[in-house]
Amino acid sequence: LLNEYDSEMTFSLPQGQGIRGLRSSFNRYYHDRRWRLTLCKL
């Protein structure tokens, strides 16, 4: 996960890695999203 509900999202892509996928889920209670990345080697 890139973040938790009601928190800042900070992420640095590791050298030699690329983003393969990105998805999120929304929570109605928090009115916020949690994000998840899938990485791959370049």
Image (cartoon, grey):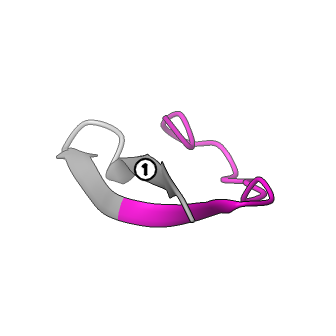
Queried whether the magenta region covers residue 18, the answer comes back as yes
22 sits left or right of 28 in the view: right
Q: Which residues are magenta?
A: 1-20
Residue on which disc 1 sits: 37
Which residue is painted at 27% across and 53% down in the image?
24
Give how far across and how far down residue 10 sits, in percent.
Answer: 75, 53
In this rendering, the answer to whether 35 lies above or below 20 is above
Q: Residue furthest front?
A: 42
Going by the numbered disc 1, the residue's amino acid type is: Leu
Give how far across and how far down residue 21 sits, in percent.
Answer: 31, 60
10 sits left or right of 20 in the view: right
Give how far across and how far down residue 19 sits, in percent.
Answer: 47, 65
Quarter holding the C terminus is: bottom right
33 sits left or right of 13 in the view: left
29 sits left or right of 1 in the view: left
Front residue of 37 and 14: 14
Q: Tag 1's secondary structure? A: strand
Front residue of 11 and 8: 11
Front residue of 14 and 27: 14
**Magenta portion: prevailing SS class:** loop
Give how far across and how far down residue 16 sits, in percent.
Answer: 72, 60
